[in-house]
Image: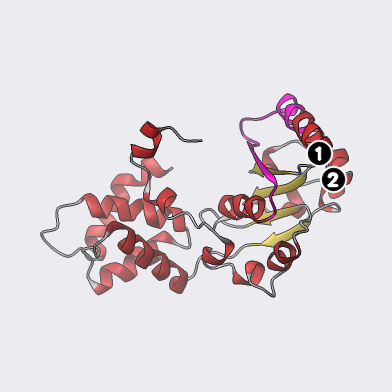
Amino acid sequence: MSTLFEAQAPHPLADRLRPRSLSEVIGQDHLLGPEGPIGRMVASRHLASMILWGPPGCGKTTIARLLADGTDLVFEPLSAVFSGVADLRKVFDAARKRREMGQGTLLFVDEIHRFNRAQQDAFLPVVEDGTVILVGATTENPSFELIGALLSRAQVFVLRRLDDTALETLLGRAEQQLGRALPLSADGRAALRAMADGDGRFLLNLVEEIDRLPRNRELGPQELAELVQRRAPLYD
């Protein structure tokens, strides 16, 4: 539960625009739509463990959260960059206790490809017996980065880079949230989508930068290129 101070604190635009249902997620209808494999799982309220493979900023973390919400599972997030076997054991123990009480756990592991073979082995028994529903996210090809035993217990779904139409939809949502249109020329707007290169998070972060600039003129491709060059080290 958030505190009053947290509720009043400023939140990044990407956080404010985070989808509240799978139907609001853009660019992944092939997986999340009524006929998509994940959409059918949610409709039946029966999730299988899965690996979400896709580029940065395409919605992997958001989808995992919404899957937990849509199936009444406890959402347990971990980053493979900062977690080890001891952290996994704590999560597994908590999941076992919940299971005894009739509550399921969705374990979301960001950058799961960063776990070594021994760490990946630790998932096998708890995925096998249903202690956790594993949702792993990776930007790398799972066939090369994950052990075969884990891949045999999880379905791999490929998320698409956000296309131009999806990025324009996201821009429109951002402007609606901000309550004003961005000071962009038509060419500048197209350049902004091209610079995002399918990464929705990068797009929204850049929108915030643009919104903070003085509104004395429209920005074109050249001005946007200078802005991206200034903030690239921060993003990296």
Q: Give the residues drawn in magenta, as a range.
A: 71-92
Q: Which residue is mark 2?
A: 130
Residue 151: percent from left, percent from top: 81, 52
Residue 112: percent from left, percent from top: 68, 43
- Tell me, yes or no, whether the highlighted magenta stretch contains residue 91: yes
Is the residue 134 above or below the residue 181 in the image?
above
- Image quarter of the C terminus: top left
Inter-mark Cα distance, 1 to 2: 9 Å
Determine whether the residue tagged by mark 2 lies in a helix, strand or loop.
loop
> Who's the residue at 17% across and 65% down the image?
218
Of pointers 1 and 2, the one earlier in the residue sequence: 1
- Which numbered disc covers residue 191? none
Determine whether the residue tagged by mark 1 lies in a helix, strand or loop.
helix
Q: Which residue is mark 1?
A: 99
Give the image quarter of residue 11.
Answer: top left
Give the image quarter of residue 95.
Answer: top right
Residue 135: percent from left, percent from top: 70, 49
The kind of residue tagged 2 is Gly
User: As rendered, which of 174 and 66 lies closer to the eye?
Assistant: 66
> Who's the residue at 42% across and 53% down the image?
202
Labels 1 and 2 touching (C-beta < 8 A): yes
User: As rendered, which of 168 and 38 lies closer to the eye?
Assistant: 38
12 sits to left or right of 68:
left
Residue 219: percent from left, percent from top: 20, 63
* Mark 2 burial class by Cα count in 10 Å: few <14, some 14-19, many 20+: some
Is the residue 51 above or below the residue 91 in the image?
below
> Who's the residue at 76% across and 42% down the image?
103
